[in-house]
Amino acid sequence: MTEPIRAITFDARGTLLHVRFPVGECYAAVARRHGAELSPDAIEKAFFDVFPGMPPLAFPPMPDGQLHDREGRWWRELVERVVEAADQKVDDFDAFFSELYTIYRGAEAWKPYREAASVLCLLRSAGYKLGLVSNFDSRIEQVLVALNLSIWFDSVVYSSRAGVAKPHLGIYERALAELDVKPDQALHVGDNLEKDWEAARLLGMDAVLIDRAGRYEGKTPAECEVIDSLESLLKRLGVTGFSLLARAHAS
């Protein structure tokens, strides 16, 4: 007999929130304030070329101060590689990176999808436990606060502290332990086929793939349930009230 769903976990970027501006534009705008001119297009291309080759953003257990230092060094290495790969130069790199790193702590760089808050609110009201599972660093906690999303979560698990990154099953196991549910009592929602849908299913969780732009069209297994917005998740779970609450959040 199938266990009823008691908890729902979400990916962050691409699922609940997204960047306000393309990476290349943000890097170029910050660099300009420090006397450098970067090509947004070159930086954008370099970022998505370099990022997949970085080691996982995951570290052994350590005190907060050390963790924050390791996180900063990881991102500094990434940004250095991106600027170099784009054949660009920033003379005052320390000041440039410091401002860039700070910007990605909050609402200046991130924006929730329009339906995110309403959906999370309705799911909590319906009695579901909610968790976040993200391949990010400790800044995600500040981002959630800045976007008024933190209040809905019972658990926030991110790779830099968990010690492993998706698709490693350990990060999901940690989230389930914090939510005090078994895998077959949980549903995961994310926008990456391998890291979200396949990993969660491998652990025994239910899973839904959110594909807002149609990038997985014709590329998913027959059993993969694909939705194009979080509102569709409510319909799947039989949770009502979205239209009324969305209008209230918009006003």
Image (spheres, rainbow, N blue to C red):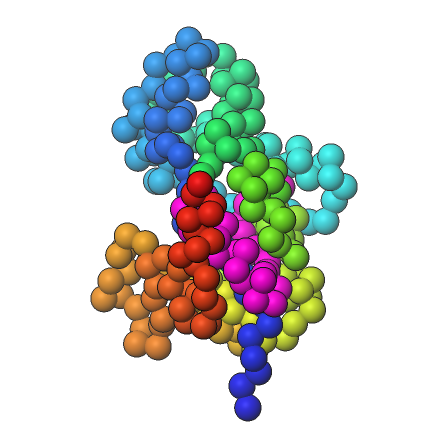
Q: Is residue 90 magenta?
A: no
Residue 206 seen:
yes
Residue 29 drawn at (x, y percent): 39, 19
Q: Residue furthest left?
A: 218
For residue 73, what is the image quadrant?
top right
Residue 21 drawn at (x, y percent): 37, 32
Q: Residue at x 72, y 49 (%)?
A: 61
Determine whether, in the image, residue 5 is placed left or right of residue 239.
right
Residue 16 seen:
no
Q: Residue furthest bottom?
A: 1
Residue 10 drawn at (x, y percent): 51, 58
Q: Judge whether 190 appears above or below 248 on screen.
A: below
Front residue of 95 and 223: 223
Q: Residue furthest right?
A: 63
Q: Residue at x 60, y 53 (%)?
A: 152
Q: Is residue 135 magenta?
A: yes
The total number of labels drawn is: 0
Front residue of 248 and 80: 248
Residue 137 drawn at (x, y percent): 59, 42
Front residue of 27 and 249: 249
For residue 111, what is the image quadrant?
top left
Q: Quadrant of the N terminus?
A: bottom right
Q: Quadrant of the C terminus?
A: top left
Determine whether, in the image, residue 187 is placed left or right of residue 250.
right
Q: Judge whether 29 appears above or below 137 on screen.
A: above
Magenta-colored span: 112-138
Q: Residue furthest top?
A: 35
Q: Judge whether 174 appears above or below 251 on screen.
A: below
Q: Judge whether 114 appears above or below 47 on screen.
A: below
Q: Residue at x 36, y 72 (%)?
A: 224
